[in-house]
Image: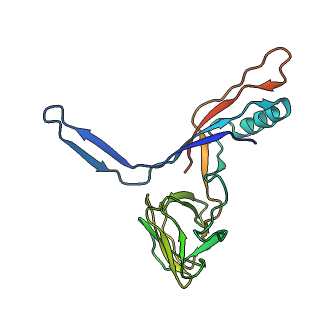
Amino acid sequence: MPIRRTDWTPPEADVLSRSMWTGASQVNTLAGPARWRCKVELPPLSAAAQLAWRGFNAALRGRANAFRLVAVEAAQRTPAGVLLGQARVYGDGQTGFQLILANLPANQTVMKAGQKLTAVHPDGDEQLVELAADLVSTADVGTALLGSPLRRTYNTSTTASIELGSPWALMRKMQPVGWGVGPLTTRYDAATVDCEEYF
């Protein structure tokens, strides 16, 4: 399905309170993870592409089913230009804002702050996270400092998959999406789909 543009909003699990009397503000961090949001803009579609889009939309059954949405414009590489693939978890009991990884390109800056990865837990949970600092490897091991907390605990013994090259988020539509039809229509208007992370 062709996509013209995606506008991503990262998860922020906090609430800002401001006093009406003093003007003082306080930020409270909420327990548990927040959700990624994305606005997906489709280009004007041909009649055949419009049918494919309608079929995809129908298969979602409203908000009942989710879909994977790739979260990068192109496959991610190291600053040195090496194409990234998959890593594995290194160490037990990993949760919170860091994840120790192995099977990385050795002794280099592997990823820059702001790049993303997808952690796929053996229970099926798929979580997109953004790096809060550069990921640097010693030998083939490095610690990823994350911008949002992990939803699951990861262990070396699990068969978790960590996607570095083409990370995605598991998403669902937030509202119904329609389309316009007119006489002698050969191209259909662009559509916008508002999505949020599914878990």
User: In the picture shown, does residue 12 fall above or below 182?
Assistant: below
- In the image, taking residue 93 as reference, residue 27 lies left or right, namely left
- Residue at horizontal 57 percent and vertical 36 percent from the top: 174
Residue farthest to the top, as pictured: 183
Exactly how many numbered labels are in the figure? 0
Coloring applied to the structure = rainbow
Q: Nearer the viewer, residue 135 or 181?
A: 135
Q: Position of residue 89 (x, y in %)?
A: 55, 75
Q: Nearer the viewer, residue 39 or 112?
A: 112
Residue farthest to the left, as pictured: 22
Q: Position of residue 180 (x, y in %)?
A: 73, 21
User: In the picture shown, does residue 122 fall above or below 170?
Assistant: below
Q: Give the quadrant of residue 19.
A: top left
Q: Position of residue 81 (x, y in %)?
A: 64, 69
Q: Nearer the viewer, residue 81 or 32?
A: 81
Q: Give the quadrant of residue 85.
A: bottom right
- Residue at horizontal 78 percent and vertical 32 percent from the top: 45
- Residue at horizontal 51 percent and vertical 71 percent from the top: 154
- Residue at horizontal 54 percent and vertical 79 percent from the top: 156
- In the image, taking residue 194 as reference, residue 61 lies left or right, namely right
Residue farthest to the front, as pictured: 80
- In the image, taking residue 93 as reference, residue 42 lies left or right, namely right
User: In the picture shown, does residue 192 fall above or below 75?
Assistant: above
Q: Quadrant of the N terminus?
A: top right
Q: Position of residue 4 (x, y in %)?
A: 68, 39
